[in-house]
Image (tube, coloured by chain):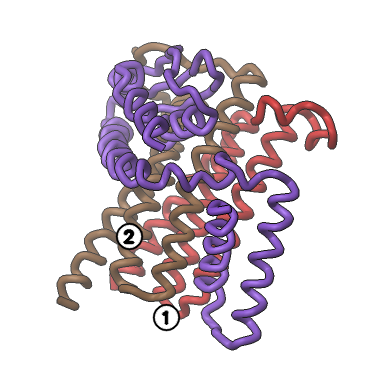
Chain colours: A brown, B red, C purple
């Protein structure tokens, strides 16, 4: 039982770390402001969610898990608000989104 | 210990976000990078708490998460309106 | 009244979770603070169906698992796009009319769209949403009305 929880924690930690890095890579690779935001939201949803889940499995039923739940709710309720504020601010300030399929290969990073 | 691996992954994400923050090009790219750095820092604090066996770090993570939202919204209001909003105007009607 | 009691209870549970030290003084202080904060919040008239929407609880229990699955699915799609060497993106802007009636419903819908990787709500109003999608498939997913219908049912059930 303990071993199973440990294994699950390890898997979730690795998966969460992987999605966080993917978000970071996307943040660097994507060609314009709006597409970068999509990449960043991978970090903020799946990456954060899996890491928090891993820590909850590791901590079991305790006060630590309650705090992790609070942290998770905090991230999940505030990150869309911040993202929306960012997108709207960008739009208001007249940052034109890139539209349509990309023809050429991405310029070096 | 997989927590060390997760901490390393988060540090790598921090570095990537920092690259975007340095490269810009617009202030909104930098704000997005700063927001990501804030989220990742909160997660990193939580992971470090487990790594060192000090769950008190979770309180810091929660505080950091709260500050991150306030910071991002304040910065964005500044860049959108040029100030942090005057008290008592009718702007609350439309929201952010 | 139920909403007030539930607000106090929520704040008190928050206090208990963060405190971790249960001496009689701290327990009483927490209760006192919770009641004081809710009293102030009532004076500000923010303890209402928007500020503390407990009536949506049962509906949320059915909506959130679905949303979590959607987030996981589209996060995986965005992951594949980010890691693909060709970077096959097709950024799209779509406008559509949401069917929600209440502000809570509209906010839930807009936040769900933003929370799902690959789509971001840029402008939100009663009449129209402006959504930026990373791929054409993501844009179709938003305009297909699946999430819209679910949020409308979520808001109606509350």
B36, above or below A96, in the image: below
Q: Is residue C37 or residue B95 the one in the foreground?
A: C37
Q: Position of residue A29 (x, y in %)?
A: 41, 33
- Mark 1–mark 2 contact, CB under 8 Å? no
Describe the element under mark 2 as helix, strand or loop: helix
Task: Please say whether residue C89 is visible from this viewpoint.
Answer: no
Asked whether the viewer can see residue C7, the reply is yes
Q: Quick one: B9 or B53, which is closer to the camera? A: B53
Question: Is B48 left or right of A94, judged from the image as shown?
Answer: left
Horizontal arrangement in the rendering, residue A63 relative to residue A13 (left or right): right
Near mark 1 (Cα within 10 A), the count class, few <14, some 14-19 or many ≥20, is few
Residue for badge 2: A53
Residue marked by disc 1: B53
- Position of residue A41 relative to residue A56, above or below, is above
Residue at (53% x, 50% y) in the render: B37
What whole-number distance in Å separates the C-alpha atoms at marks 1 and 2? 17 Å
Q: Residue B55, relative to residue C136: is it above or below?
A: below
Specify the subunit that label 1 lies on: B
């Amino acid at each position: 039982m303990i071993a199973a929880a440990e294994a699950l924690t390890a898997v979730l930690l690795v998966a969460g770390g992987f999605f966080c890095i993917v978000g970071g890579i996307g943040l660097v690779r994507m060609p314009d402001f709006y597409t970068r935001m999509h990449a960043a939201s991978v970090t903020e949803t799946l990456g954060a969610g899996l890491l928090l889940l891993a820590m909850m499995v590791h901590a079991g039923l305790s006060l630590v898990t309650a705090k992790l739940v609070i942290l998770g709710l905090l991230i999940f309720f505030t990150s869309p608000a911040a993202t929306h504020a960012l997108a709207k601010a960008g739009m208001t300030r007249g940052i034109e989104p890139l539209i349509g399929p990309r023809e050429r290969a991405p310029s070096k990073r | 210990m997989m927590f060390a691996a997760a901490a390393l992954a988060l540090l790598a994400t921090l570095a990537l976000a920092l690259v975007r923050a340095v490269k810009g090009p617009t202030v909104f790219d930098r704000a997005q990078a700063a927001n990501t750095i804030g989220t990742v820092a909160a997660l990193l604090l939580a992971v470090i708490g487990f790594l060192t066996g000090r769950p008190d770090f979770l309180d810091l993570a929660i505080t950091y998460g709260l500050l991150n939202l306030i910071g991002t919204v304040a910065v964005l209001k500044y860049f959108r309106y040029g100030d942090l909003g005057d008290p008592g105007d009718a702007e609350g009607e439309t929201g952010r | 009244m139920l909403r007030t009691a539930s607000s106090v209870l929520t704040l008190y549970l928050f206090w208990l979770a963060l405190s971790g030290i249960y001496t009689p003084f701290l327990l009483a202080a927490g209760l006192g603070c919770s009641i004081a904060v809710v009293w102030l919040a009532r004076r500000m008239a923010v303890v209402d169906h928007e500020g503390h929407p407990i009536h949506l609880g049962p509906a949320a229990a059915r909506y959130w698992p679905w949303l979590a699955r959607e987030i996981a699915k589209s996060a995986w799609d965005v992951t594949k796009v980010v890691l693909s060497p060709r970077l096959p993106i097709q950024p799209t802007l779509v406008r559509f009319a949401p069917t929600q009636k209440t502000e809570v419903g509209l906010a839930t819908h807009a936040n769900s769209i933003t929370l799902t990787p690959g789509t971001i709500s840029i402008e939100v109003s009663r009449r129209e949403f402006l959504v930026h999608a990373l791929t054409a498939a993501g844009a179709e997913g938003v305009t297909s009305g699946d999430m819209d219908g679910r949020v409308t049912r979520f808001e109606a059930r509350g």
